[in-house]
Image (cartoon, rainbow, N blue to C red):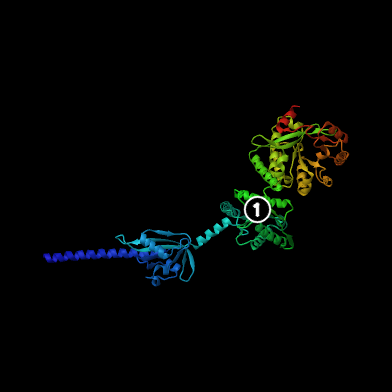
Amino acid sequence: MDHHELDNAILRNLLTQTTRAYESQMSELFAEKELAQVTLASIGDGVLATDGDGRVKYMNPVAEKLTGWAQDEAFGRPLPEIFRLRDEASGKTAESLVDHCLREGVNLRLAEKITLERRDGRRYAVESTCAPIRHLDGRIVGTVIVFQDVSDKRLLGLQLAHQATHDDLTGLLNRQAFDGHLQRALEDTRTHGSTHALCYLDLDQFKLVNDTCGHLAGDELLCRITALLQDIMRETDLVARLGGDEFAVLMPRRSLAEAELQVAQFHRALQGYRYTWRDKTFTIGASIGLVPISREFKTVTQLLSAADHACYVAKEKGRNRIQIYQEDDAAFIRRQGEMNWVVRIQETLEQDRFCLFSQSILPLSPTASKGIYFEVLLRMVEEDGRIHLPSDFIRAAERYGLMRSIDRWVIRECMRTLRTQPPPFLDLLHICSINLSAVSLGDESFLDFVEEELEASGVPGPKICFEITETAAIENFSQAEKLLARLAARGVRFALDDFGSGMSSYSYLKDLPVSFLKIDGKFIKDIVTDALDRAMVESINQVGHVMGLLTVAEAVTSNAVVEHLRGIGVDYAQGNWVSPPRPLGESCATATRR
């Protein structure tokens, strides 16, 4: 083979190899292109590409669906015509988005409050990113936009946000959201001197509807009241349900006089409203507190407390009325004092700073037992050591629902003290008398609590006597009868305290397992000089003895009173002259040593 033929052979061989390499590369490129096409067609996001002038060059099927444009129709058209995107927050359009990306050469992301208008006018909430497409030499030759439909996600977010700030039943603002509006109103008042008003209302007959017709009826009533409020209040007023049957209205830019007229209009409408549930019709009232929002209120808590005070005073004055908050009003001052006591009571319970005293009770008649008989007395101890009598704090405890906790603390601590006394204390003990509030008397779970404490302490039931007032016994008669009967079966005894103050419980004595009548001290203190008091004591003592009950005279102040009581035949005497109160543990130890 000559040189010419050899060169041709080498050339053909090189050409063949080059052709095969080219075909292989083209095949690989085609395969990669096919893979890219399949991938873009199968992903869930819309993909749209433009050239350097912002004209559409490519759309995947999802982009076609979301925009309403087929790729063949969209090809070469300006992007804003196809991709009608708007950022509601910034006002940016798709055109400005692409222009910025082409100009700056950076990736952009738009994720909040973006809408895409489809060709047929339908709108989608979308999240979108835009990135530059670069040539091998680094030049920007176009953009690629990736976007997805997040309408469901955004709707869910809006629903969750609404649920977090609104009441599920009525759709009104909830307490947390309302507090935020009150805070802004306070800041506006302090900064600009603006006038606003706060209305706080509590339905007067809601519990009756709930108890009579059930919770469905109660829920429906709350929705009806909501509609009535929204009909009468202005569109700028913010109405909230704070919980239960309590509502509040923030009235922006309203003087007290204007707010009072508006609230009075609602109150009149409510008075004329009749709520019917099946065969029952109810007249619905509301106690309303109205507060002008002024610079004197430093916090939302203070403001709501003032509104609550006003509402409560409205209830105290007869319910179903409007009460305007006045800082120097005696009723507000008294209730503020009670609220302060509530905080102190709660702290005392949490820190276990209550303590028990006892007062011995003296036997007078031959039939009275000579064993240890005393009444347990409660004292509140401040952190600085000051001691308060029940008369200081019991009214607040009763009014604000703390007596249940106090009663249980007293019983638990009393049982613990009795249990830990050395012998022969329990053998010598005749009666340990413990006061019981009307709230506990009507508490169905209280019975189980007492039985558990008796079992745990090992104190015999007959050693314990619960003192209840005649008023409490009558008001909770059905529950009291059940409670007394079951505990009496365990030997526990009962005394009617302050007997005679109402003179209404004689007819109930036959139905309650009472062992003692404690004659109200107001009949005892002047028994030596007042013939009427002496006659009253004689009458109560006689009725008690006829029924087989023992009598105890309270508030005994002198030996002369004791001798008069002996003459009448009263069985026991109690008072500071007989025995001043002493710490329970100390008096138990002293009694054991005698």
The 10 Å Cα crowd at callout 1, few under 14, some 14 to 19, many 20 or more, is many
Nearer to the camera, 18 or 512: 512
**Screen quadrant of the C terminus:** top right
Q: Quadrant of residue 2?
A: bottom left
**Of helix, strand and loop, which one carries label 1?**
strand
- Splitting the image into 4 quarters, where does residue 587 fall? top right
Q: From this viewpoint, is residue 44 visible?
A: no
Name, please, the residue furthest toward the bottom: 73
Locate residue 402 relative to residue 67 in the image: left or right.
right
- Across and down, in percent, residue 550 comes to 83, 38
> Residue 191, position in %: x, y?
56, 52
Left or right position of 158 against 31: right
Reply above or below: 311 against 457: below
Q: Quadrant of the N terminus?
A: bottom left
Depth check: give the residue in front, 342 or 585. Answer: 342
Amino acid, disc 1: Val
**Which residue is rendered at x = 65% and y = 58% of the image?**
259
Would residue 199 be visible to someone looking at this image?
yes
Q: Quadrant of residue 249?
A: bottom right
**For this rendering, which residue is in front, 91 or 39?**
91
| Residue at x-position 65% and y-position 39% | 348
x, y percent for residue 401: 69, 46
The residue pinned by badge 1 equals: 291
Residue sitting at the far front = 193
